[in-house]
Structure formats: C-alpha cells, structure tokens
Image: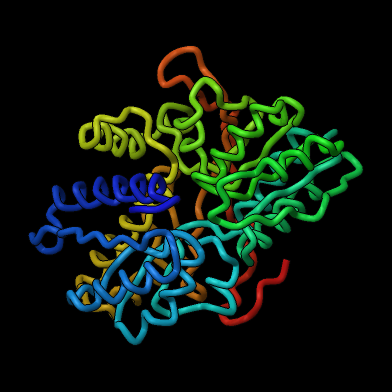
C-alpha cells in the first residue's frame, strides 16, 4: 500500500473489497459477515514478513498476499509455522516448484505461463519481427520471465529470431536513460518490457521522449497493464501489448454476465469507470478463491480451508478457474490486449483482445522440483 508498487496495491485492495461485499450480501459464512484487515507489505520482502507477523499476532489465519515474488518467497516458509493459508499472485517459477509451500496457493499464472503465452501471441501477430531485446528486474523472476517470453516468440514467429541478452535493472531504479540509449543505438524491432508499475511507466515516458517507442514495432510488457495507460493517457504508445486480466469495457467481457456484475459493483464502490486488470488478478480472484474455499470447507480452520482449496474450481471474470491439488497452481483463460491512446475519456483504449487457455502453457505439476522449460 506504499512505495513504488502502491498503485498495484490499491487496485488489488479494491478488487478484494468487491469480492467480500458480494460474498457478504449472499450470506457470508453461515450468516456471519467477513471483515477485511489490511496490512502494508511496503512492496518489499522485509515489509511482507513484518506484515505477516502483525496479522499472526492478531489471530488472523486466512489471507491473500504475496502479490509479487520477493514478498511471496519471503513469507512462504513462515506460513506453516504461523498456521496461515495464503492465496497470492507472485509469478516466480519456484513458488510452485522448489519453494513450494503447502499453505500457499497461486491464483495467477506463473512467469512461464504468462510470458510464454504473451510471446506466442506476439510471435504470431508480428511474424516478421526478428530482432528482439529484453529489459527486466535483476531477480530470478525477472530472468525467468524474459526466458519464457523468448521461448514463446520462437514458437510462433516465422522470422529468423535473435534475442539480445536481457538488460537487468534494480526494482527501484528511477532512471533508464542509459538503457534506452543502448536500445536506440541498436537495430532491435521488438522489446520485452519486464519491469513493472512505477519503473515501467518511467521507462516508457523516457523512451517516448527520445523516440524509442516509435522506433519499435511491438512492445510486450510484463503485466503493469492499464496502470500504464492510466498514467500516460493520450501519450500511451499504440504498440504496447499487455497480459491483462480484465477489460470490462471490451469483448469478451462486455458480454460476460459475471464480469459485468463485478464491474457494476466496482463502479458503485469506487466511482471509477475504468478499473485496471490488477483489480481482478491481484485482488478479486485470490479473495474470491479464498472465500469459496471457506464456503466449501464450511470452516475457517486453516487445515480445512487448505483441503477445500486443493482442486477447487470457481467462477471468475474470465470464466471457470481451477486450483490444481498437486502444486496449488491456478489456471483459467488468459487475456492479452493492445493498449493505445484515445481522443476521448479515459484517453486510452484496449483493442485486439486475444484470449487463450492457460492449460496450453502449463507444465505438469512438480512441487519441490525445479521448473523445466
């Protein structure tokens, strides 16, 4: 809720609140309403551990959190001893592999799923783009994502592909003029932008000022999605493609009754007619999964909720969503959208929305074992 990832936290909180409001209107847990307690992990591992300890001290045993990989990997080893079950959206491959925790459930595609899928979509839509570069956070999750994106592009592109070694940057880097200069002086045609939220917006604003966004034929970005468009508005580059989660004002969501009801509730609660996808992927979907797990278990005891979450299938804005029993990895329908500017409110648009089944990019379960591409 603070720091460089605060915009993502605000979106996730709004989605969680909508899920709880709907659940309580439907009767809550045996007539008892669910009450939300919020703890700020400050967007870093140390803050996540401190937040977890505060929640544990308050007697809380059911939570959503670990929205990004550093925070999730910090709290996962502590969950069993704290007797806490947690649903989160961290994308690091190790979350459901070598760092698997029986108390953590991922209601979000991992890096291999997201970025292989995004790469496949863009390789197919831009089959003649052969020279690519990547910029990502200097973390295992960042490198995993860049490798998966490259693998996806290579699967569907018809061009002779070359990928430069990923450019690695700090998650708190405020300035990217050196990296942008390197890209401007190269012959790349496509870019994988694997930095998120504040840093991604700063990169694109600086890249636009020197013409890099015009030079590139396509930019595949790592999941900041409409947070970019809301910040840049009519200055949003028209060649950005994002792995989104929810575009309620675009098909296939406009004809999805579940999506439109959530959208109505969101607008009534916030007054915002243009939610970002993180509202769904980091807030509504994990919270709804947790609530449905409690409902299925008919209990709030940790062990019973964990058993209920394993193999759970529940409805979301993109249709049925399933959490695998073996490794606690969720999967459903994935969405990729083309962001761009618009002349009228909200001064950005989403077009060419592409939907695909995440099962097509999901590996067999192997909890405790390293991921194999």
Quadrant of residue 260 within the rendered picture: top left
Residue 215, given in percent of the width and then of the height, sits at 76, 27
Q: Residue at horizontal 66%, vertical 77%?
A: 370
Q: Height in image: 153 above or below 213?
A: below
Q: Residue at horizontal 44%, vertical 50%?
A: 4
Which residue is situated farthest in the top direction here?
A: 343
Q: Residue at horizontal 29%, vertical 51%?
A: 16
Quadrant of residue 39 within the rendered picture: bottom left
Examine the rendering and report whether any part of residue 255 can be seen: no
Q: Nearer the viewer, residue 266 or 178?
A: 178
Q: Is residue 129 left or right of residue 171?
A: right
Q: Nearer the viewer, residue 169 or 363?
A: 169
Which residue is situated farthest in the bottom direction here?
A: 81
Q: Height in image: 181 above or below 209?
A: below
Q: Is residue 71 left or right of residue 189?
A: left
| Quarter of the figure with the C terminus | bottom right
Which residue is situated farthest in the right direction here?
A: 160
Residue 363, given in percent of the width and then of the height, sits at 64, 66
Residue 107, given in percent of the width and then of the height, sits at 44, 60
Q: Is residue 93 left or right of residue 229?
A: right
Examine the rendering and report whether any part of residue 156 can be seen: yes
Q: Nearer the viewer, residue 189 or 119?
A: 189
Q: Residue at horizontal 65%, vertical 49%?
A: 117
Residue 135, given in percent of the width and then of the height, sits at 69, 49
């Amino acid at each position: 809720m603070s720091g460089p990832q605060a915009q993502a936290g605000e979106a996730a909180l709004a989605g969680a609140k909508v899920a709880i409001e709907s659940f309580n209107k439907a009767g809550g847990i045996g007539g008892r309403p669910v009450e939300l307690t919020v703890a700020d992990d400050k967007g870093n591992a140390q803050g996540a551990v401190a937040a977890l300890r505060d929640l544990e001290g308050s007697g809380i045993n059911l939570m959503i959190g670990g929205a990004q990989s550093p925070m999730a990997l910090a709290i996962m080893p502590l969950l069993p001893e704290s007797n806490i079950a947690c649903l989160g959206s961290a994308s690091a491959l190790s979350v459901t592999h070598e760092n698997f925790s029986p108390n953590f459930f991922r209601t979000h595609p991992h890096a291999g799923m997201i970025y292989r899928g995004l790469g496949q979509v863009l390789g197919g839509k831009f089959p003649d783009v052969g020279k690519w570069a990547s910029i990502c956070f200097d973390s295992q999750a960042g490198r995993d994502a860049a490798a998966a994106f490259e693998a996806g592009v290579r699967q569907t592109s018809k061009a002779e592909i070359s990928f430069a070694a990923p450019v690695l940057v700090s998650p708190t880097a405020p300035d990217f003029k050196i990296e942008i200069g390197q890209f401007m002086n190269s012959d790349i045609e496509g870019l994988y932008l694997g930095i998120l939220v504040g840093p991604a917006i700063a990169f694109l604003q600086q890249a636009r000022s020197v013409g890099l966004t015009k030079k590139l034929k396509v930019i595949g970005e790592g999941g900041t999605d409409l947070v970019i468009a809301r910040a840049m508005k009519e200055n949003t580059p028209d060649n950005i493609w994002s792995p989104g989660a929810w575009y309620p004002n675009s098909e296939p969501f406009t004809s999805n009754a579940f999506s439109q009801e959530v959208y109505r509730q969101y607008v009534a609660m916030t007054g915002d007619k243009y939610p970002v996808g993180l509202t769904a992927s980091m807030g509504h979907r994990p919270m709804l999964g947790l609530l449905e797990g409690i409902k299925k278990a008919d209990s709030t005891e940790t062990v019973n909720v964990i058993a209920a979450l394993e193999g759970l299938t529940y409805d979301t804005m993109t249709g049925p969503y399933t959490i695998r029993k073996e490794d606690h990895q969720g999967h459903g329908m994935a969405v990729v959208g083309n962001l761009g500017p618009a002349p009228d409110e909200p001064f950005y648009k989403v077009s060419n929305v592409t939907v695909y089944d995440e099962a097509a990019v999901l590996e067999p379960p192997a909890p405790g074992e390293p991921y194999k591409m």
